[in-house]
Image: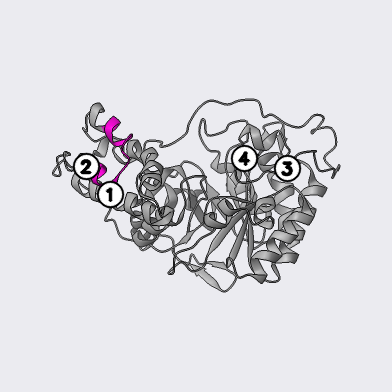
Amino acid sequence: MLEGVTLKLGPYVVDPPVVLAPMAGITNVAFRQLCREQGAGLYVCEMITTRALVERNPKTMSMIQFGALEKPRSLQLYGVDPATIRKAVEMVVEQDLADHIDMNFGCSVPKVTRRGGGSALPWKRRLFRDIVTSAVEGAQGLPVTIKMRIGIDDDHQTMLDAGRIAQDAGVAWVALHARTAAQRYSGTANWDAIASLKSSLDIPVLGNGDIWEASDALDMMSQTGCDGVVIGRGCLGRPWLFADLAAAFAGRTDRVLPTQGEVAALMLRHATLLVEWWGREKEGVTDFRKHVAWYLKGFPAGGELRAAMATSSSLTELGALLSQLDPDVPFPREILGQPRGRTGTPAKVILPQNWLDNPDDDTIPEGAELDDSGG
């Protein structure tokens, strides 16, 4: 247990100091509801592009839906143009679309970095300052936070400069995924970087990277002095991780280890919530398919049954397949602490031409803006 840990976000207290990381295609209303019911904290919706929000793209407007009980409503924005950022943030405030805005400077996928966005952007210090300042000013008091990485690679680290710029601009906190963009999701997160950033800033610093169990969160906070943790891949197929985290921060040792039957019931509920969100059964169940392997990791469900679930197209079909699982099989303890989701290998970061030449160049790369279809 960590004594005296209080994480504030504007008028809100985040207790325990745990944040669900925005994950594309994952942290929609349905998944956030499952996680939120397990334990208190902050749950951020999947990333929204500022261009698509300003243009009121129909897909984007559906992505920013929140449940009736979500408070605060947390929205992550991505953008590279300070003017568009300001318009989007002002729209959020004027139309009461969210209570908290997080800014994405951590994405490392090539389609983002090759346009100078995500984890590539903090290298351009003046542009980064303009973007964060525009967001904070446009928010008119609504709390703004940022999420970033250590840097582009080991030779082009940006976290300390970016952290200080963000602090001076007035952000509420900085969250650090303790890997470089070049690492992607490979290797081991460098928790020492979190400690270094924490010692350099006066505002709260949250740590992210390699939190697979509740004990990892406590270890990270103890080792780095960070003010909270951000949970990403560790909760894939395990929304009950938030119950474990709530218990751990309360000083309890109880942990949730659901049987295969309990996991099956949660899977069906997750799919049902997705159907309700989509408003169409086939689309909701299809959206759920990617979660099957994560939920059943370590359980003795056969390959044929897993494959059938991963191609199911109705709740009735999925429910019939889930009913074939032995409900009494205990949770596979041997998988505790193992990585989940993407891993991969390091790779050279794809950047705009001459991107590294001048960190003070604030030119916006041509074609830098994305919409929520990825274009």
Question: Residue tagged by mark 2?
Answer: 322
Can residue 290 be seen?
A: yes
Tell me what residue is drawn at x 51 percent, y 46 percent. 23
Crowd around label 1: few <14 · some 14–19 · many ≥20 (10 Å): some
Q: Please state if 12 lies on the left or on the right of 38 as rendered.
A: right
Left or right for 351, reference 38: right
Q: Position of residue 167 (x, y in %)?
A: 71, 59
Rounded to the nearest angstrom, the CA distance separating label 1 from label 3 is 40 Å
Residue farthest along the bottom direction in this orientation: 11
Q: Which mark is residue 55?
A: none
User: Is 262 situated above or below 6?
Assistant: above
The answer to whether mark 3 and mark 4 are in CB contact below 8 A is no
Viewer-nearest of labels 3 and 4? 4
Q: Amino acid at mark 3?
A: Leu
Q: In this picture, which residue range is highlighted in magenta?
A: 306-318
The local crowd at label 4, few if under 14, some if 14 to 19, many if 20 or more residues have their Cα within 10 Å, is few
> Mark 4 — residue?
374
Indicate which label's residue lies in the foreground, 2 or 3: 2
Q: Nearer the viewer, residue 59 or 249?
A: 59
Give me the C-alpha separation between circle 3 and circle 4.
17 Å
